[in-house]
Each structure stands twice: as C-alpha cells, then as structure tokens.
C-alpha cells in the first residue's frame, strides 16, 4: 500500500470558523464546497466587529450585526461556486479625526467556493 501526502490545495468543506481579531480575520478553511455552509463566528478582539460576506464583484451575500468582544454565534449561508471576501466593515474614527475601515486595516480573507 502506498500512502502519499502532499501540500496541494485544501479539500473543500461545508463548514468553517471565523475568528475576528482586532486588525485581522482568520477563517479555519478558505476552500468551501458549494451549497449550504455553516460558519462559527467568534470575536476574539477587544472591539466590536462584523462579518460581511461579499461576492467577487462586491455584492453583499450576508452580514452579521455587531459581534461583541467575546461573543460567539453561528451563521448558515448558501454559497454558489466563486470567490468571496469575508470582511469586517466597521468604520471608526481615530482621535486625530481619520476614518478607518477595519477592512482597510487587514480584516479580510479570500474564500474560494467550488
């Protein structure tokens, strides 16, 4: 019997978890099967965040409301084959008046379905 292990693409799955950190977003799986997908969401940061799922052309598929620090929730969504962005789209203002979108700060992950 021959067993071969390689470093190819990850096998598609129908579930993923997403950790929302301050300044970054981490999905446990970035290759998903088309159809129903279960997403476990956890805010591991000190500030409120959101999870917004958009298609490759920027159309919103679904979004959470505010996810409080330490909060965990589940989301079910049906995804067609394609490329998606999982992002946090909270906008905040710094003490010096600048407007920052958490997406611009690195809270984004590209997910492939197919």
Image (spheres, helix red, strand yellow):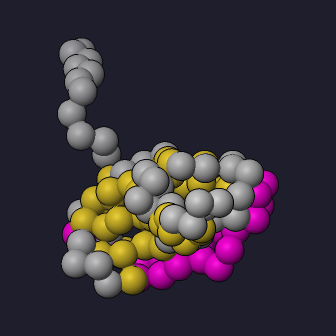
Q: Number of labelled discs?
A: 0
- Quick one: 25 or 89, which is closer to the camera? 89
On screen, residue 71 versus residue 55, left or right, reads right
Residue 65 within the segment the image draws in magenta: yes
The quadrant in which residue 64 appears is bottom right
Q: Residue at x 21, y 16 (%)?
A: 2
Q: Residue at x 65, y 79 (%)?
A: 65
- Quick one: 112 or 10, which is closer to the camera? 112
Residue 76 within the segment the image draws in magenta: yes
Q: Residue at x 76, y 57 (%)?
A: 69
Camera sees residue 19: no
- Quick one: 9 or 91, which is closer to the camera? 91
On screen, residue 42 versus residue 59, left or right, reads right
Q: Position of residue 98 (x, y in %)?
A: 51, 65
Q: Position of residue 82 (x, y in %)?
A: 22, 69
On screen, residue 12 versus residue 97, left or right, reads left
Q: Which residues are magenta?
A: 61-82
Q: Position of residue 114 (x, y in %)?
A: 24, 63
Q: Residue at x 51, y 48 (%)?
A: 24
Residue 28 versus residue 83 in the image, above or below: above
Q: Position of residue 4 (x, y in %)?
A: 23, 20
- Quick one: 59 or 78, which is closer to the camera? 59
Camera sees residue 74: yes
The quadrant in which residue 87 appears is bottom left
Name the quarter where the N terminus is drawn.
top left
């Amino acid at each position: 019997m021959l067993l071969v292990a390689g470093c190819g693409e990850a096998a598609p799955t129908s579930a993923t978890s997403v950790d929302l950190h301050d300044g970054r977003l981490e999905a446990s799986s970035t290759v998903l099967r088309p159809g129903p997908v279960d997403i476990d969401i956890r805010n591991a940061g000190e500030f409120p965040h959101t999870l917004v799922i958009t298609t490759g052309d920027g159309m919103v598929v679904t979004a959470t409301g505010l996810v409080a620090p330490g909060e965990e929730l589940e989301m079910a969504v049906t995804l067609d084959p394609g490329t998606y962005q999982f992002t946090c789209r909270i906008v905040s203002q710094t003490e010096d008046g600048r407007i920052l979108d958490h997406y611009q700060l690195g809270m984004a992950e590209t997910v492939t379905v197919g």
